[in-house]
Image (cartoon, rainbow, N blue to C red):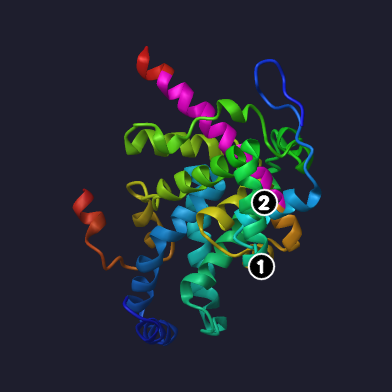
């Protein structure tokens, strides 16, 4: 799909009952929605549930899509809300205390003098991705959602606050803590990989 | 600011204003004038330099390694089945 107009036509055709257009809309956006879901859920089964539920809602509620934003933005909000709801129900709050201790008062985080720049590590892409995924999986949910939306999906502070229904200052605090946490976990993971590869 | 014998800093007595400026800078929310003030501070404070550099490099790292996760085999097929739609793509067929 090349532009907004094409999308508008496809949406209209899908609303008129054209199954092929509906399938094209699903096919166009499913990879990115799955990618978002896996980043938030850190679990393939849950991510697949979010994917399916998102598109079931799309089919059911497409007539309420006003077309003010792109269809992807609309689907993105649906998927994010579904993922956050699921995470809340699962009560994934592990190691919440650890990260809460990273406050402005200790904002340097720990051992910064020994910090290793992950960009300088000569690892292949799959190792880097594994390190990153491992570090993200250790982030408590309330921080992970801010981190994924703000830093990885590049939403603004305002958009992130709106998506998560929290204040902008809360987004900023959580982001700061999440970044410190990620920095320290990535540095640790890089060291782990080096040990594994050397053994 | 205090340091341990190992050289690791254990405290950082900066004003809230400076810490807030650094957070704003990292969030791309800092105005031009304040940027100059922060730049000057960072050039004189090795701890803040390491802090800002390390956070910026970390953000760069995960943005660089943030690929779109491909759907595992069968996910798309199951999606279309649940939605009762016919997949126009030949991707799933090619995987078989």
Which residue is at the far left? B94
- Residue B22 got which mark? 2
A141 with respect to B53 (left or right): right
Q: Nearer the viewer, mark 2 or mark 1?
A: 2
Vertically, is A115 above or below A54?
Answer: above
The residue depicted at 51 percent of the width and 58 percent of the height is A153
- Residue at (52% x, 60% y) in the render: A154
* Image mark 2: chain: B
- Determine the residue located farthest toward the top in the rendered image: A199
The N terminus of chain B: image quadrant: top right
Q: Is residue A188 magenta?
A: yes
Residues at marks 2 and 1 touching, judged by CB atoms closer than 8 Å: no
Measured as percent of width and height from the top left, residue B17 is found at 78, 53
**Closer to us: B93 or B70:** B70
Crowd tier of the residue under label 1, counting other residues whose Cα lies within 10 Å: few below 14, some 14–19, many 20 or above: some
At numbered mark 2, what does the secondary structure look like: helix, strand or loop?
helix
| Secondary structure, magenta segment, majority class | helix
In percent of the image, x 61 and y 52: which residue is there?
Answer: B39
Q: Which residue is labeled 1 in the image?
A: A158
Residue B25 visible: yes
Q: Is residue B70 above or below residue B47?
A: below
Q: Identify the magenta region.
A: A173-194
């Amino acid at each position: 799909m090349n532009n907004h107009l094409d999308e508008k036509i496809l949406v209209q055709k899908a609303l008129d009952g054209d199954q092929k257009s509906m399938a094209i809309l699903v096919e166009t956006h499913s990879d990115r929605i799955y990618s978002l879901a896996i980043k938030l859920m850190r679990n393939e089964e849950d991510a697949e549930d979010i994917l399916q539920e998102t598109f079931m809602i799309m089919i059911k509620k497409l007539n309420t899509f006003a077309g003010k934003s792109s269809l992807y933005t609309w689907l993105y909000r649906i998927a994010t809300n579904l993922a956050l709801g699921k995470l809340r129900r699962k009560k994934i709050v592990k190691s919440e205390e650890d990260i809460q201790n990273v406050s402005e008062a200790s904002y340097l985080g720990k051992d910064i003098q020994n910090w290793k720049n992950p960009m300088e590590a000569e690892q292949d892409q799959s190792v880097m991705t594994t390190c990153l995924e491992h570090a993200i999986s250790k982030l408590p949910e309330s921080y992970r959602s801010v981190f994924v939306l703000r830093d990885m999906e590049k939403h603004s502070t305002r958009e992130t606050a709106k998506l998560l229904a929290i204040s902008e200052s809360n987004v900023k605090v959580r982001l700061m803590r999440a970044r410190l946490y990620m920095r320290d976990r990535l540095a640790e993971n890089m060291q782990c990989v080096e040990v594994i590869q050397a053994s | 600011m205090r340091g341990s014998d190992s050289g690791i800093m254990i405290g950082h007595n900066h004003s809230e204003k400076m810490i807030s400026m650094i957070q704003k800078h990292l969030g791309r929310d800092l105005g031009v004038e304040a940027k100059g003030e922060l730049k000057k501070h960072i050039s004189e404070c090795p701890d803040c330099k390491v802090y800002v550099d390390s956070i910026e490099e970390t953000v760069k790292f995960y943005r660089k390694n943030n690929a779109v996760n491909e759907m595992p085999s069968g996910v798309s097929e199951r999606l279309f089945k649940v939605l009762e739609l016919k997949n126009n793509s030949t991707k799933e067929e090619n995987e078989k």
